[in-house]
Amino acid sequence: MRSGLRVVVFGILGHIPLAGIAWQALHYLEGFRRLSCDVHYVEDTGAWPYQPKGNGASEDSADTINYIARVMDWCSLADRWAYCSEPQGRRIFGLTSHQLAQVLEQADVLVNLTGATILREEHLRIPVRIYLETDPVQAQVKIAQGHHLTLDILQQHTHHFSFGENLGAPDCGVPIGELKYQPTRQPIVPDWWTPEATRVNGACFSTIANWRQSGRDVTLNGDTYHWSKHQEFLKFLHLPEQSHRPFELALACDDPDALQLLRSHGWRVRDAIALSEDILPYRDYILQSRGEFTVAKDQNIRLRTGWFSDRSVCYLAAGRPVITQDTGFGKMLPTGKGLFAYRTMEQILDALEQISADYSLHRQAAEEIAVEYFSADRVLASLLERAGV
C-alpha cells in the first residue's frame, strides 16, 4: 500500500442516522486515516432522509446535515465530508460542489460501504471501486434468480468484499455465481472502546437490535430464509428464567404485545432509538454491559455465511465477552474464550457458566480477539492490498 492513498468512503450515515451505522462508518474512516490515507466521506443518496423517531422519510434534511456534521466533527473530519441529495436537485452539503468534484477526480479508491450507493459516471472514473457488503445473501440470491439490475450494479465495481467470510465454501448455501467475493470483516479502533475503566459487577448481558423487520426474506430452492431477528429471539425466550441472570435488550420495537411478552419472561427492555441518537450514549451502553448476548439473522445461520456483527466487535473491543448465534464464523475466529458461538439453549447456559467462573479471563480474551482479528490497521491494510493498491 503506497503512502498518501486517496480513499473515498461512500456510506449511509445520514440516510440511517443511528449510532450503530455511524460507528461502522467511523471505524473505516479513522482506520484509513491511521494508515496515512487521505480520506473523505461521501453520501450520495436518491432518498429523502430517514427520521428514526417518526419511522419514516422527511423532506427536511436539516437534522440529517447537522447529525453528519456533528459525527464528522467528533472524529476531526469536519472539512472532509459531503452529502449529496438527489431529491433536492443534487444539492450538496459539507464540501462545495467544486471541492467534491476535485475529491472524486483525484481519488485512487472508492469504498462503497454497505453497497448502498449506485455509482454515477463520475464515480466510475475512480480506478479501484470496492463493493463492501456488510449483509450477505440478499444480492447473491437476487442475481441467482436473474435480477439483472443487481448484477449490473455490482459489476460497476472492480472488487467485491463481504462480511460473509464463508461465502463460496462447501458448507455455505449462498449461490455466488460469477462474482468473486473476498472475505473481510468490520475494522475496529480499539482505543475508542477503552476510554476508562468501567465497573461491570452486576451489569446485564445486553444487545442493541431491531425487533421486527419485514420485506427482506428470501426464497431459495423452495425454502424461505428470514431477515427479521425477532424469530430467533423468541427461540430463547426463556433464557432469563433458565439462567437466573439478568438480560437486557435495547430494541427498536413499537409492538406493545412483544414488549410485554419479553418482560413477562424476565427480559429487561429499553428503547434502542433513544439510545442510538448519538454515538457516545451507544458506546457508554456497551461499556456498562457485562457482555453481549444476541442472535443473528436466520439467513446467515442456516446458510452458514460466516457473518459476524460489527456491533459485537464493539463489545469485544470493550473487553466484553460475546455469546452469539453460530453462522459459521468459528471457522475464522477463535471461540471458547471471550467469544462463544451457540446453537442451543444448553450451549448458551454453558457459556454463561464459563464466563462467570473466570470473568477477568474472558474479558481479556474478548479484547485480544478484537485486537488480533479486527484492528483497523490489519483489516484495512489487507483490504487495500487485495484490491491491488
Image (cartoon, rainbow, N blue to C red):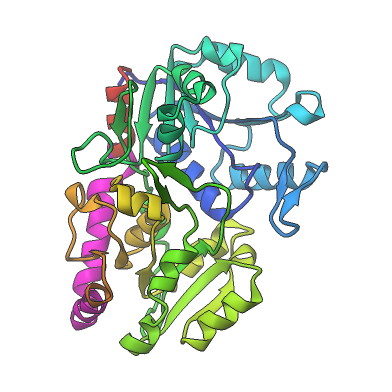
Considering only vertical position in the picture, is 216 above or below 336? above
Considering only vertical position in the picture, is 24 above or below 5? below
Q: Is residue 287 something that shows in the picture?
A: no
In terms of image quadrants, where is residue 155? top left
Verify whether residue 48 appears in magenta. no
In percent of the image, x 44 and y 43: which residue is there?
219
Q: Nearer the viewer, residue 254 or 114?
A: 254
In terms of image quadrants, where is residue 83? top right
Q: Nearer the viewer, residue 163 or 63?
A: 163
Q: Can you say which quadrant of the picture contains the C terminus?
A: top left
Q: Is residue 265 something that shows in the picture?
A: yes
The region drawn magenta spans 349-378
Residue 2, given in percent of the width and then of the height, sits at 32, 18
Query: Does residue 91 appear left or right of residue 173 in this picture?
Result: right
In percent of the image, x 49 and y 69: which residue is there?
285
Considering only vertical position in the picture, is 194 above or below 137? below
The number of callouts visible is 0
In percent of the image, x 56 and y 65: which residue is there?
281
In percent of the image, x 48 and y 82: which residue is there?
267
Q: Main secondary structure of the magenta part?
A: helix
In terms of image quadrants, where is residue 131? top left
Residue 105, given in percent of the width and then of the height, sits at 56, 11
Query: Does residue 215 appear left or right of residue 47 in this picture?
Result: left
- Residue extending farthest to the front is 222
Residue 361, given in percent of the width and then of the height, sits at 19, 72
Q: Can you say which quadrant of the picture contains the N terminus?
A: top left
